[in-house]
Image: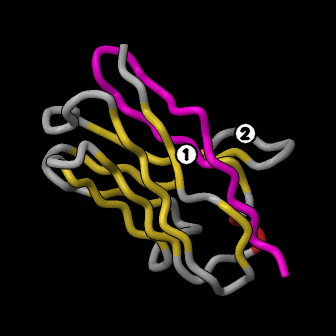
Amino acid sequence: QVQLVESGGGLVQPGGSLRLSCAASISIFSIKVMGWYRQAPGKQRELVADITSGDSTNYANSVKGRFTISRDNAKKTVYLQMNSLKPEDTAVYYCNAQIVRTYWGQGTQVTVSS
């Protein structure tokens, strides 16, 4: 069983920054794709960004230029650096790992509000 534990969420003012972390219970070196998704109230879960084992990245248009995904294989952790946050970024953010099956973390709340 693979466990993913997110941290780093919180309340931030518009224009601020947060860094989310996703710590895995296993080595992530060979995990083909890991990603961050988010779900706002009343909306479907959507892809924010993902990163392959070869460090190729993919971003939702709404976060391009503001968010950066990265992975540290030695620490078994994937990060999401979020800058220039907007109220519409408010959501629960989930970590995702695609192995034989798809694994999800429990989520971390990000609230952008003045």
x%, y% of residue 10? 68, 62
The secondary element bearing badge 1 is classed as strand
Which element is circle 2 on?
loop
Q: Is residue 9 left or right of residue 99?
A: right
The structure residue drawn at horizontal position 53% and vertical position 66%, both measured from the top left corner, is 61
| Residue at screen point 75% across, 71% down | 112
Q: Is residue 62 above or below residue 51?
A: below
Q: State the extent of the magenta-drawn residues as a range.
A: 93-114
User: Residue 1 in the image: x percent, y percent?
Assistant: 36, 13
Q: Quadrant of residue 2?
A: top left
Residue 108 located within the stretch drawn in magenta? yes
Q: Amino acid at mark 1?
A: Tyr
Disc 1/disc 2 C-alpha distance (Å): 10 Å
Secondary structure of the magenta portion, mostly?
strand
Which residue does the image show at 63% across and 83% down from the upper left? 16
Name the disc covering residue 9, or none.
none
Position above or below: 100 against 91: above
Q: Which residue is mark 2?
A: 44
Q: Which of the two marks, 1 or 2, is nearer to us in this view?
A: 1
Mark earlier in primary sequence (1, 2): 1
Q: What number of labels is visible?
A: 2
Q: Residues within 10 Å of mark 2 (few under 14, many from 20)?
A: few
Which residue is more in the foreground, 24 or 15? 24
Verify CB contact (< 8 Å) between mark 1 and mark 2: no
Quarter of the image with the C terminus is: bottom right
Amino acid type assigned to the residue bearing label 2 in the image? Gln
Judge whether residue 107 is colored magenta: yes
Residue 77 shown left or right of residue 88 in the figure: left
Q: For mark 1, what is the residue? A: 37
The colour scheme used here is secondary structure
From the top left corner, tell me how far across and down residue 46 is, in percent: 61, 45
